[in-house]
Image (cartoon, grey):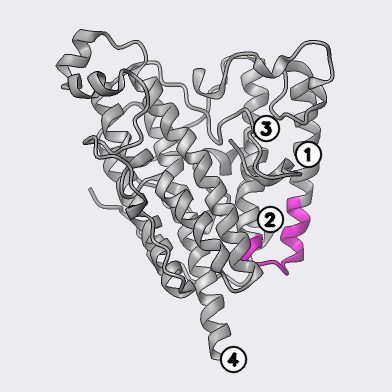
Amino acid sequence: MAMGILGDFMWKYVKKLEYPICIDKHNLKLAKAILTQCGGPNGELGAALQYLAQRYNMPDDLGKSLLTDIGTEELGHVEMIQTMVYQLMRGATLNELKEAGLEGYYGQNGLSINLGDSNGVPFTTAYVSNTGDYMADLESDLAAEQKARATYEHLMDLTDDPNVLGPLSFLRQREIIHYQRFKELKAHYLDKKRD
Amino acid sequence: MNSSTNNYIKCNYIEHVNPNDLYNSYNGFIRGNMFPDLYNSYKLREPIEIKPENEQADMLTYLDGLCFALTDINLYLDTHPNDNDMIGLYNRFLNEYNLVLGDYEKMYGPLNTNSNALKGNRWSWNDSPWPWEY
């Protein structure tokens, strides 16, 4: 899924990932760990919903555009995480599922993508911060990017598979860029407040 | 494990970035970052190269790079809307993206539902593979 480049109306699906994912070796424990970046407390789904909900309260066009565009990119990252989990479970046998301790996951979800964290805790909008105070919201966005960056580092610690490290590293780097742009928006608002 | 260089902590508002200082689209794409001053690696000594296995994948990688350059420069322009030099670079990437996208869709099928590649008798939007199936 990609950004508003061709978007002449609403949101549009683009039939490609932001970064290609081709994982040929399944790894169930890693799939379970990475699932947290889909529906976990610091995950992409929460970030997308948070920015896209907060943008209505941004005081000017800089804030509205940045939250719209980063929120849209995060939706593409949900697709990347779900693709990683899908491919990391692809072709696993029942024995492998049992050995990895995924009987509970398989019982509830089969091999589908659960919208929860690594421990099966379901996604909740309690992860989403939206106060109606744009400076407070922006601070929560900066924190969200840092927490997601830290999570990607933990996930990168868990694997040496280049086909998994590539997309994880890409996603981690996006958190750094988003953090930088949010910092610039914050600096812009602080200057404005002084005027 | 801790990051060796925490430059993401040090970054302040950057008034202006010279478009010539950016990575090219492929090198930015494999890093997830078009801006060398903001690049911060973790665990990997070198960014992982994309290794396309056929001509289609090769062309898609090139398109992915252009699409990524647009995404990343778009965010920069959101907070630097008066940076005319960077708007120029955005438009150069956009022109190239549109050309390569048209060629790709003609050869390998539509990536968008408003693609000219859908102007036929057969509904090729449904064709596999889907992005997660590689």
User: Is A87 located above or below residue B11 in the figure?
Assistant: above
Give the magenta part as a residue range: B77-90
B107 vs A90, left or right, is: right
Q: CA distance from mark 3 to mark 4?
A: 44 Å
Label 1 vs 2, first from the N-terminus: 2
Q: Check disc 1 and report its element: helix, strand or loop.
A: helix
In three-dimensional space, the C-alpha distance between marks 1 and 4, rounded to whole angstroms, equals 41 Å
The residue tagged 3 is B63
Q: Which residue is mark 4?
A: A195
At 59% from the left and 55% from the top, the residue drawn is A68
Q: Amino acid at mark 4?
A: Asp
Q: Secondary structure at mark 2?
A: helix
Say which element carries label 4.
loop
The residue that disc 1 covers is B96
User: Of tags 3 and 4, which is closer to the observer?
Assistant: 4
Tell if the residue under mark 1 belongs to the same chain as the one under mark 4: no
Q: Residues within 10 Å of mark 2 (few under 14, many from 20)?
A: few
Which one is in front in this view, the residue at disc 4 or the one at disc 2? Answer: 4
For residue A65, say whether it is visible.
Answer: yes
Image quadrant assignment for residue B46: top left
The amino acid at mark 1 is Glu
Percent x, y for residue B40? 42, 52
Magenta stretch: helix, strand or loop mostly: helix
What SS does tag 3 mark?
A: helix
Residue carrying label 2: B20
- Chain identity of mark 4: A
Left or right: A121 in relation to B125: left
Q: CA distance from mark 4 to mark 2?
A: 34 Å
Tell me what residue is drawn at x 35 percent, y 40 percent: A39
Whether callout 1 and callout 3 share a subunit is answered yes
| Image position, residue A92 (x, y; %) | 30, 12
